[in-house]
C-alpha cells in the first residue's frame, strides 16, 4: 500500500477480535488507531482519533449496530471511509448503510485478500494525505535493566541527527515516556519538563500544533521530549484511549515518534502495539530476558499482532562471563537477533549519570556507532529477512486462509 491507512474498528464480538486484528495488521500500511467493543464510544473516537477508515463488524446485531453507527457515518462520510462486514444479506440493511454513506460492504465469509483489496481501493481514492503521518517506533525491554530507555533516547537523537543517507536533511523526532510511574527519559536527556503527557491527555479534544509544541521539552539535539507524569495520581488517571489519541496527534507533527514502554502488557501497551510501524524488543543474553522474549512473541502472535513488525535488539552484546550463546538464543526464539549493541558499561553508565546522549558524550564509541547504525536501518525502511518472518511462533495466523471465525468459512 502506497501510504498509511489508519483504521478504527467497531466490534462487539470477542471471538472475532483477534483474527480481525491479525488480518488487518497483515496488510502493509494499515495501522489500527482504536478498537471499540462498545458502539456508544464511537462518537468520541471519531473526534479523538484521526483515521481514514471505519471498519464496523455489524454482527451479531446488525440492526442495533446500524442504529448507532449510521448517523455518525453520515456526519463523517467526507472525512472517513466506512466499511461494513456482516453475514446478514438483508437488502434493507444494505440500503440503509449505503444511504448513510458506508463506502464498502463485505459479506462473510470472504478471503482476507478481499479486505486488503478494499483497503487498497480506498487508499487510491483518498490520494495523498494532507497531514503528516510520522512513523511510530515502540521500544520495549523484556525485563528490567536491559537498557531499553537508553536505546530509545539515543535512537531518537540519532534519528534527529542529519545523515548522508538523507542528504543532510533534518527530520522532526519526538520521544515519549510511557512508563508513567518510573520513566527516566527526561532524566537521561537532562531536560526539565514543564508539562508532561498527563497535560496532553487531559486536553485531547483541543490538541493543536501550538499545544503540542508547548508540552514538549526541546533537547539540544533537536529531539522533542514528552515526559512521564509528575506524580503517581496523574499516572493512574491516563487511559489507553488517551494514550492512543496523544500518539496519533504527535504522528501528525513529527516524522518519527519513539515510544519508551514499560515492561508490561497493559491496555496502553496494546494500544501502542496496534499503532506501531516498528516494535523493538530489547533483550540480553540472559535466561530471564530470553524467556520473557519468548513469552512476549507468543503473546503478540496469540493476540493477532503482526510479528513482521517486531525486531529483536540484543543489548550489551559481547560480554564473556556466563552469557548465553547467540546461536542458541536464536534457535530458542526461532528468530534472528537483527541488531546488536555492544557492551560498554563504563561509557553508557557515565552518559546516563550526566544526562547526555552518546552522540555528544562519546561520539566515536562503539556503542554510539551501533545506535547510529540502528537509526540508519530503521530510517531506510530496512526489512526483516524473509527467514525471520517464516520463523515466527506457530500461533501467527496464516495470511492466505479464509477467516476461520466466520460461520461457513473454510
Image (cartoon, rainbow, N blue to C red):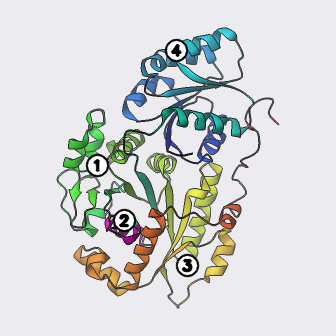
x, y (%) of residue 196? 24, 51
Q: Residue most toward the top?
A: 92
Residue 182 horizontal side relative to residue 192, left or right: right
How far separated are the C-alphas under marks 2 and 1?
22 Å
Q: Is residue 118 above or below residue 384?
A: above
Q: Main secondary structure of the magenta part?
A: helix
10 Å neighbourhood of mark 4: few (<14), some, or many (≥20)? many
Q: Is residue 324 magenta?
A: no
Labels 2 and 1: the sequence-earlier one: 2
Which quadrant would the N terminus be assigned to in this image?
top right
Residue at 38%, 38% (x, y): give it: 130
Residue 262 horizontal side relative to residue 23, left or right: left
- In the rendered image, which residue does mark 3 sit on? 285
- In the rendered image, which residue does mark 2 sit on? 159
| Residue 281 visible in the shown view | yes
Labels 4 and 3: the sequence-earlier one: 4
- In the rendered image, which residue does mark 1 sit on? 197
How far separated are the C-alphas under marks 1 and 3?
33 Å
Q: Nearer the viewer, mark 1 or mark 4?
A: 4
x, y (%) of residue 275? 48, 47
Q: Is residue 253 above or below residue 66?
A: below
Labels 4 and 2: the sequence-earlier one: 4
Amino acid at each position: 500500500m502506497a501510504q498509511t491507512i489508519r483504521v478504527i474498528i467497531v466490534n462487539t464480538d470477542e471471538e472475532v477480535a483477534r483474527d480481525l486484528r491479525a488480518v488487518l495488521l497483515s496488510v502493509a500500511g494499515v495501522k489500527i488507531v482504536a478498537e471499540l467493543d462498545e458502539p456508544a464510544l464511537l462518537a468520541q473516537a471519531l473526534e479523538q482519533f484521526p483515521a481514514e477508515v471505519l471498519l464496523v463488524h455489524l454482527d451479531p446485531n446488525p440492526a442495533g449496530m446500524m442504529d448507532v453507527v449510521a448517523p455518525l457515518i453520515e456526519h463523517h462520510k467526507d472525512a472517513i471511509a466506512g466499511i461494513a462486514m456482516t453475514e446478514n444479506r438483508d437488502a434493507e440493511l444494505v440500503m440503509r448503510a449505503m444511504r448513510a454513506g458506508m463506502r464498502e460492504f463485505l459479506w462473510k465469509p470472504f478471503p482476507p485478500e478481499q479486505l486488503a483489496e478494499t483497503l487498497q481501493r480506498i487508499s487510491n481514492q483518498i490520494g495523498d494525505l494532507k497531514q503528516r503521518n510520522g512513523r511510530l517506533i515502540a521500544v520495549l525491554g523484556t525485563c528490567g535493566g536491559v537498557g531499553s530507555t537508553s536505546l530509545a533516547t539515543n535512537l531518537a537523537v540519532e534519528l534527529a541527527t542529519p545523515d548522508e543517507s538523507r542528504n543532510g536533511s533534518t527530520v522532526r523526532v519526538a520521544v515519549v515516556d510511557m512508563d508513567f510511574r518510573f520513566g527516566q527519559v527526561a532524566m537521561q536527556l537532562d531536560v526539565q519538563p514543564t508539562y508532561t503527557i498527563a497535560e496532553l491527555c487531559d486536553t485531547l479534544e483541543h490538541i493543536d500544533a501550538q499545544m503540542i509544541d508547548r508540552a514538549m521539552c526541546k533537547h539540544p539535539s533537536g529531539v522533542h521530549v514528552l515526559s512521564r507524569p509528575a506524580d503517581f495520581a496523574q499516572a493512574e488517571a491516563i487511559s489507553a484511549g488517551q494514550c492512543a489519541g496523544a500518539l496519533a496527534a504527535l504522528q501528525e507533527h513529527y516524522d518519527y515518534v519513539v515510544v519508551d514502554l514499560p515492561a508490561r502488557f497493559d491496555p496502553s501497551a496494546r494500544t501502542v502495539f496496534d499503532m506501531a510501524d516498528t516494535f523493538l524488543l530489547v533483550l540480553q543474553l540472559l535466561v530471564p530476558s530470553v524467556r520473557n522474549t519468548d513469552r512476549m512473541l507468543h503473546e503478540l502472535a496469540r493476540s493477532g499482532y503482526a510479528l513482521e513488525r517486531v525486531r529483536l535488539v540484543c543489548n550489551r552484546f559481547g560480554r564473556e562471563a556466563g552469557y548465553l550463546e547467540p546461536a542458541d538464543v536464536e534457535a530458542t526464539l526461532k528468530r534472528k537477533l537483527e541488531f546488536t549493541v555492544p557492551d560498554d558499561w563504563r561509557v553508557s553508565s557515565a552518559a546516563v549519570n550526566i544526562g547526555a546522549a552518546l552522540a555528544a558524550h562519546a561520539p566515536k564509541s562503539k556503542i554510539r556507532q551501533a545506535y547510529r547504525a540502528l537509526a540508519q536501518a530503521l530510517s531506510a525502511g530496512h526489512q526483516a529477512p524473509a527467514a525471520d518472518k517464516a520463523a515466527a511462533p506457530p500461533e501467527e495466523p496464516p495470511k492466505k486462509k479464509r477467516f476461520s471465525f466466520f460461520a461457513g468459512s473454510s
